[in-house]
Amino acid sequence: MMNIYERIGLKRVINACGKMTILGVSAVDRTVMDEVAEAASNYVEIDTLIDRVGELISTHTGAEDSCVTSSASAGIAISVAAVISKGDPNLVERLPDSSGLANEVILLKGHSVNYGAPVTTMVRLGGGVPVEVGQANESEAFHVASAITGRTAAILYVKSHHAVQKGMVPLAEMIRIAHEHGLPLIIDAAAEEDLKKYVAAGADLVIYSGAKAIDAPTSGFITGRKALIAACKAQYHGIGRPMKIGKECMLGLVKALDRYAVHKHDGRADIPALEAAIAEINGIRGLSAELEQDEAGREIYRARVRVHADVLGVDAAAIEAQLRGGSPAIYTRKYYLNAGVFSIDPRPLQGDDLAVIVARLRQLAGACLQENTAKENA
């Protein structure tokens, strides 16, 4: 049976990449969408809804309060605007023009990532001036402390697989430095699965995507200190206005959070199916596979597939391009193609997706071997 996107003439997509924006992030559960539909068909006072949803989100994070957003990206911009304006209505209306204000946001150079857009762009949207410290592969506490001046508004910490995982100043140290200097510590934890960890660690504002680990409709939220959250909400009369979230996605997020508390994905449950697929892939000449854990330490397991170019005559980039360019289009996790590997993330897979992926790999490898034989016999 064709899905709704196939019915409008688009290719079926098998998402073995992860909770990625370019593929629509998550497949939302029907019970969540029922809540979305009911919310969409009724009226409500939006300001009071924002406050109530913030209270409900906070029951899941343990924070003093929370501010619902349209996405984690919006959460970064709104958080930066909040720490610069502190909710002052005149400054809220003035941003992103922050000239003359304390507007610098310090982040480690190894955290200055592009996740589909540069994180520094989101800082600038909120009126912030990014100040990158340390080196890409190594940073020290003194790099952070020495960058703090009267112009500093906050310190931003990016907890992501995109960020450099070694040689960075530990989070606890970043929080200590921020608080010793009377500065808020903001964490971009967009795809993180633990909703309480960073608030409990002492972060002032923590930003999550609703549509990633939580499997909510398009949404996000900022959770943390009450005064700063009030300043975040104030931005909906300024730079947050084009980032507003609809009433239906707010309640979809709340329902997804309730569901997540009960049905949080257990990464270890994916291991048996992955190991079976790995065994099949290891039986394909020119390919090999092994189990790997998420590079950022999350409880997520994937199948790491290596392409042996000396056997197949093509490299991992070529195989990945053929997977993505076929029908159905198969998207794998391709961050390490330069090292000859790509990964299969089981979390977004549906139905027979994993079997289809293995069959396509077998087909592609076989075609490469046949072509090599033909060339040798020519």
Image (cartoon, grey):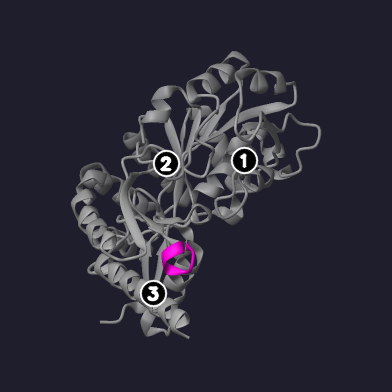
Where disc 1 sits, the SS reads: loop
Magenta stretch encompasses residue 253: no
Q: Which residue is mark 1?
A: 112
Are discs 3 and 1 less than 8 Å apart at CB?
no
Q: Residues within 10 Å of mark 2 (few under 14, many from 20)?
A: some
Please state which of the two labelled residues, at mark 3 or mark 1, is closer to the viewer: 3
Report the front residue among 57 and 189.
189
Please state which of the two labelled residues, at mark 2 or mark 3, is closer to the viewer: 3
Task: From the viewer's perspective, tell me whether residue 84 is left or right of residue 158.
Answer: right
Q: Which residue is mark 2?
A: 295
Image quadrant where residue 307 sits:
bottom left
Q: Quadrant of the N terminus?
A: bottom left
Q: Residues within 10 Å of mark 1 (few under 14, many from 20)?
A: many
Check residue 357 in the rendering and tell me which mark sits there, or answer none.
none
Q: CA distance from mark 2 to mark 3?
A: 32 Å
Are discs 1 and 2 less than 8 Å apart at CB?
no
Amino acid residing under circle 2 = Glu
Q: Residue at x 31, y 68 (%)?
A: 357
Image quadrant where residue 330 sits:
bottom left
Q: Residue at x 75, y 21 (%)?
A: 150
Give the vertical position of 235 relative to 341 (above or below): above
Point out the stretch of residues depicted in magenta.
310-315
Disc 2 or 3, which lies upstream in sequence? 2
Are discs 2 and 3 less than 8 Å apart at CB?
no
Q: How many circles with numbers are drawn on the protein? A: 3
Residue 332, image x, y percentages:
41, 61
Q: Residue at x 50, y 64 (%)?
A: 317
Residue 206, image x, y percentages:
47, 35
Please state which of the two labelled residues, at mark 1 or mark 2, is closer to the viewer: 2
Residue 320, image x, y percentages:
45, 66
Q: CA distance from mark 3 to mark 1?
A: 42 Å
Q: Residue at x 47, y 59 (%)?
A: 21
